[in-house]
Image (cartoon, rainbow, N blue to C red):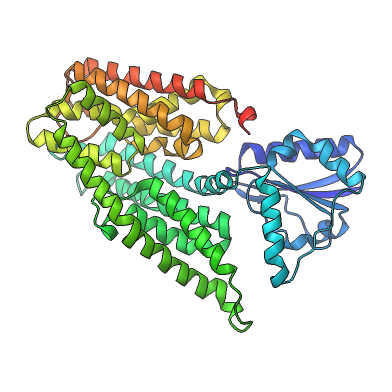
Amino acid sequence: MKLVAITSCPNGIAHTYMAAEKLAKTAEKMGHTIKVETQGSIGVENELTTEDIKNADGVIIAADKQVDKSRFHGKRLLEVSVTDGIRRPEELIAQFEKNEVPVYMEQTAAMKLKSVEEVKKERSQKQNPVYRNLMNGVSYMIPFVVIGGLLIALSLAIGGEPTAKGLVIPKESIWNHIFNVGAASFTFMVPILAGYIAVSIADRPGLAPGMVGGYIAANGSFYGSQAGAGFIGGIIAGFLAGYIVKAIKSIRVPQVIQPIMPILIIPLCSSLLVAAIFIFILGQPIAGIMEGLTSWLNSMQGASKVVLAMILGAMISFDMGGPVNKVAFLFGSAMIAQGHADIMGPIAVAICIPPLGLGLATLLGKKKFTNEEREAGKAALAMGLVGITEGAIPFAARDPLRVIPSIMVGSMVGAVIAMLSRVADHVPHGGPIVAVFQAVDHVLMFFVSIIIGMIVTALLVNILKKPVDADN
């Protein structure tokens, strides 16, 4: 038999090519020929030609991302997860030998709605669709996090000068331009995450409303909040946009209107709906929660310092630069102005523990992380050194139930040690970089707090996570 295949995983790195290799070797072993197109992070490679598809006896799609199947009309087509392509290549090919694979038929618009639902139902039994949609967004978000974080880290480390307002880069410095480029990359992070979650749910019509919703979620000025909803808000916006677009797509419209539905009516209506829901429904509660958290923190000043340190450490790491993080950070900054630099000290420790701890975890437990995660771990270490908590976001977005509790515990431990050791930070910034500029009292314990916190995080993550192959 002559077979063709497509492999693709959410991150487009390891599993994409592992599945391609397994299918190619197994087909050769079983006496068949196969050409595998990979849709990885660098784009399409070994692309299937019209002639390849025409001459093929069957098609295998081993992917956890949406793949366009329209070019395979009339061909026997088997659609499975990328993991199945790695683990069950012989079984997949054997189905073609036994003639057990149905022919894929592109259907009319009226019938296609039903067939899509059937396909979604079948695939949901093999993989959680929420996870698949989330991973699609994360895979596109990661480059923006890495580029932005590393450029900001580099510019602050080399060009930053300590002032009463924190580390400041002189406007005339070349490092200020580099910092601005990094900041621009960060501004795309949440909209890209939301946009490609929506694309995974509703295809290309979901891109515009998803990105619009993500931008609004990240920009608290739309709904009266000083801190935006962060990457958690972006995830909510992405799913909201995706399912709104999907619902609008299911509405039957006159044939004359159908051509403009995907390029005008669907993006326009869904963008307005997502914006309205975030601005008028979700935004105001978020603003109220932020104000409540601020008042709560102010009321904790006279309480146990250990309890306060635990609360601040947990808040800083909970959403990694999001609104909860910002409330704790602003509280610490305000305390500096009131002469309580010892409140900012534990915060400065907690700020860097999530990225440093996860970076260390990728070095200690390589089997627990994908190749892409190990590369992101190196970037996270660099970001942690200059106090960029967002370096932990790719890990938390991928595996929140294991990662977020681990970084919260590590940050709480580090913050408590810093509080008991009377570590103080006189500038509103965090990470080892503030000690380099002599802005920290009790420097030795400052570093001890960070090291213990990052070790706790790294150990917890590696205890909770399963080996990559077992997870996938």
Residue beneath the point at 25% across and 46% down: 290
Q: Nearer the viewer, residue 48 or 419?
A: 419
Q: Residue at x 64, y 46 (%)?
A: 64
Residue 135 vertical placement versus 109 (above, below): above
**Residue furthest out toward the bottom:** 256
Q: Classify residue 234 as left or right of residue 416.
A: right
In which quarter of the view is residue 456 placed?
Answer: top left
Vertical comparison of 48 with 427: above or below: below
Residue 454 at what x, y percent from top left? 37, 22
Q: Is residue 423 left or right of residue 382?
A: left
Residue located 18% across and 22% down the image: 305
> Residue 224 location, x and y as percent?
24, 57
Quadrant location of the C terminus in the rendered image: top right
Q: Position of residue 464 (x, y in %)?
A: 51, 24
Residue 277 lies in quadrant: bottom left
Give residue 410's position: percent from left, percent from top. Answer: 36, 23
In the drawing, does residue 294 fall left or right of residue 90? left
Q: Residue at x 39, y 31 (%)?
A: 355
Q: Is residue 373 above or below residue 196?
A: above
Residue at the far left in the pictured view: 338
Q: Is residue 381 visible?
A: no
* Residue 430 visible in the picture: yes
Q: Give above or below for 210 relative to 307.
A: below
How many numbered discs? 0
Q: Nearer the viewer, residue 56 or 47?
A: 56
Residue 244 in the figure: left or right of residue 104: left
User: In this view of the protein, which residue sits in the foreground, 45 or 352?
Assistant: 352
